[in-house]
Image (cartoon, grey):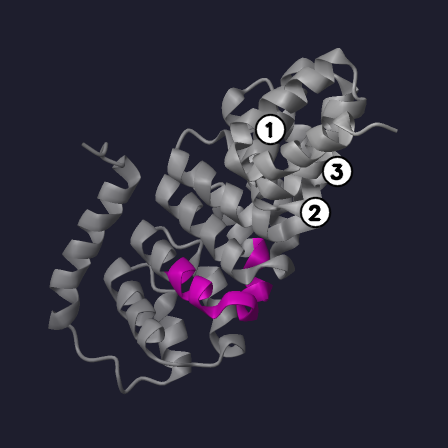
Amino acid sequence: MTPIHPGRTTIIIGTALLAMVLPTLSPAADRDLNSLLEALKSPDPVIAMQAAEELKKKDFPANSIVPGLAQALKHSNEVVRLTAIEILSDKGPQAATAVPALSEALKDKDPSIREAAALALFSIGKPAMSATPGLLSLLGDDSKRVRDAAVLSLAGMEKEAVPGLLQALGNKDPRVSAAAAEALGKMGQMAVHELISVIKKGDSSASRAAAKALTHMGQPAVSPLIELLRTGDAKTADLAEETLDNIGSPAVPELVKALRNKQQPK
């Protein structure tokens, strides 16, 4: 049975209650954009949520609603905050000006908000790279869902996130090092040489985490690992061999080729 997520349960209940109340209010369909943005600021969660739902349904230009939605991330009601984040996520790179507000939302007390903010930053992509420090801080979050969202977003930052992720590999918290390894593994070829360098340095915990990242990476890591197996010292060669074994079938053709080359007379 999937464990109950306390924060998500609170939001689901809150959404259900608001859904019961919203139909009783006067329709907001005739309100213009300025009226909706003003209603979004209301301390009354029902009024703010009604405005958020209308903004969600209408295809307003991103530049006209993103500032108001970013401001809504400070609303006292978590359902309003979550809905605002969902709209920003739908806007993708067009919501880039909301990155500072989303970065603050990564610190929200509610794990569902932290998760949604990380996923919105993933949707925005590279324009959100200033959020990298905040995303890195989530690698040790108590919620696995939040950690997974941070991993996905950091992997999408590509090279910009590599230095911070490499540093996180050596973190004493196994959740942090494992999450960093997963994010680097999702990056493929662009992080492979940095991970090989970590193994060569010989720090035990960081090397193990780097090997795990290379395992996640699969095929792009095979040739560099075979080279490490051939040229490294006994310790690094053993780890390279173990990692290739963990990669499994994608490593077999390269291993066979390397073995044949080794056996050919010079």
Mark 1: few, some, or many residues within 10 Å (few <14, many ≥20)? many
The N terminus sits in image quarter: top left
Q: Residue furthest right?
A: 266
The image quarter in which residue 135 lies: top right
Look at discs 1 and 3 and give the one toward the viewer. 1
Contact? badges 1 and 3 (CB < 8 Å):
no
Residue 228 in the image: x percent, y percent? 75, 27
- Look at mark 1 in the image and give the residue it sits on: 244
Cα gap from disc 1 to disc 3, whole angstroms: 15 Å
Of labels 1 and 2, the one closer to you: 1
Tell me where residue 257 appears, x and y as whole percent: 68, 36
Query: In the displayed image of the protein, which residue is found farthest to the front?
Result: 265
Q: Can you give x and y, in whole percent of width and height, for residue 260 in the image?
A: 71, 31
Relative to residue 79, is residue 23 depicted above or below? below
Q: Quadrant of residue 38?
A: bottom left
- Estimate the spatial distance between the alpha carbons at disc 1 and disc 2, rounded to whole Å: 19 Å
Report if residue 8 lies within the magenta region. Answer: no
